[in-house]
Image (cartoon, rainbow, N blue to C red):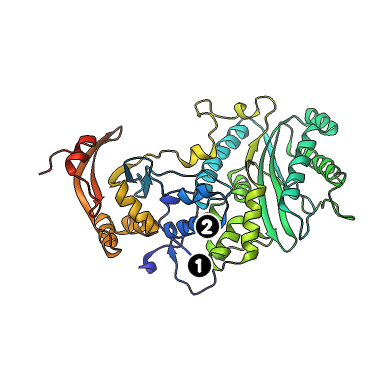
Amino acid sequence: MCSKYKAIQPKGAALDSITDVVPQGKTKTAKIPAKVHYRRLKETAADVFIQKRLGECGKRAVSTTVTIKETADGKIYTSGVWSCGRAWLCPTCALKVSQHRAEKLLSFVESASRQGVTMMMITPTIPHHQGTPLKDLFDLVRESFRALTKNKRFAAAKKKYGFEGFVRSTEITHGKNGWHPHLHVLVFATCEPDELTKFCELIFEIWSDIVDRSGKLKKGQKCSRKAYNISPVNSKEGMSNYLNKWHIGNEIASGQSKKSTSGRSVFQILQDYHQNPTAKDKRLLQEYEKATKNKQQLTYSRAGNFKAKYTDQEEDQEKTDFDIANEKKEGKPTLAITRPLWNKIVKLRIVGWFLHVYQVSGQRSARKFLVRKGILPVALGEDILYTKDGFFRMHVWDLKKEIYAIDEYLKTTPLPKTG
């Protein structure tokens, strides 16, 4: 069946809306459905990371039934399950959160551009070498950027160039020179592009001076101007280059076929560990987990009303990663699975395959798939739900071995009489 599928073209969509397949690198391993691939990575993450909440993500039912819904474009997803929201660590939550942040940021940039604001992307970085703990490097990056925003030369230049604010994202990779935490910063100003370029050059001078004076570099190490890029961001194409720097959708979905020349991201390390577990990769992953605890991936300048100035007034307040990961999506309910049956599917670790079969071949094939796995779903009947989009007929399945009296079920969930 894999020959019928198209290779995945990741756009940062939420996990449960992806139904194509993920390549498994240069090996001869057959392509597997993306739903299966992501959930396998989630299982690996739950095993290796210390944070145990990952083990319940996408598994724990938060209501009496788990509902399978269908979006307007025919993709299916689950509703009524809990998500951890750990965007630094969880492959599925990271995908959902990064997609949401990317959409909001793109809207923000377009609003600023319409108001005549000029934007540049800069990449402040620091010298790094093998053996330096990630926490030390990450702290140096964050402390240096904080010092930059409080620098007197920077404060004077802000007025000269009409500085509006920053949007800062953090990227962390690991390569032959060890950990490499660095920033991708969007600089917003009302001056002309040539003037903003001069301002960005000044930022590098201040940044390098702060880092060099930190006393935390090895003797002879200095910030490299070659590693400090200045790129204009005044179009959707330019904006996509920025989003790709921190958006994790591509690096997860592309499987082992994507290798960065600057090193591996945490999700590439996780994929390597998933295919070939090593003590070294496990140590790297756990070190990364500790260093990123309670840190933010994407931040906006807090000074003045920078964010509110270019944000649609109708938008809701800023949501946390947890809120985004657990956000309810619009969709047509097609099947309700009782908690006992869902827990059985989770226990056998076949959620990904079950959803994939349901997506590709429909409800009847999904039931046959469960039967082949030793699970006998029992149809309790049909429920009719009313939403703002109209009435929907939804089947209800339960687990035969643990089925309770239908009369008791009807007390909590009345079902209409069926022909």
Q: Amino acid at mark 2?
A: Asp
Q: The N terminus appears in which quarter of the rendering?
A: bottom left
Secondary structure, mark 1, is loop
Residue at x 52%, y 49% (from the top left corner): 52
In this rendering, the answer to whether 309 lies above or below 60 is above
- Report the side of 401 relative to 237 (left or right): left
Task: Residue 295: give x, y in percent of width and height.
Answer: 64, 41
Residue lying furthest right:
220
Residue at x 62%, y 50% (from the top left corner): 289
What is the crowding at mark 2: few (fewer than 14 residues within 10 Å), some, or many (at least 20)?
Answer: some
In this rendering, the answer to whether 355 lies above or below 79 is below
Residue lying furthest left:
419
Residue 222 in view (yes/no): yes
Residue 265 in view (yes/no): no
- Report the side of 175 relative to 359 (left or right): right
Residue of label 2: 47
Label of residue 104 in the image: none
- Report the side of 110 relative to 418 (left or right): right
Q: Nearer the viewer, residue 246 or 397?
A: 397
What is the crowding at mark 1: few (fewer than 14 residues within 10 Å), some, or many (at least 20)?
Answer: some
Q: The C terminus appears in which quarter of the rendering?
A: top left
Q: Nearer the viewer, residue 347 or 312?
A: 347
- Dividing the picture into quadrants, the one containing residue 311 is top right
In this rendering, the answer to whether 274 lies above or below 158 is below
Residue of label 1: 24
Q: Amino acid at mark 1?
A: Gln
State which mark lies toward you, 2 or 1. 2
Q: CA distance from mark 2 to mark 1?
A: 21 Å
Residue at x 63%, y 44% (from the top left corner): 293
In this rendering, the answer to whether 141 lies above or below 3 is above
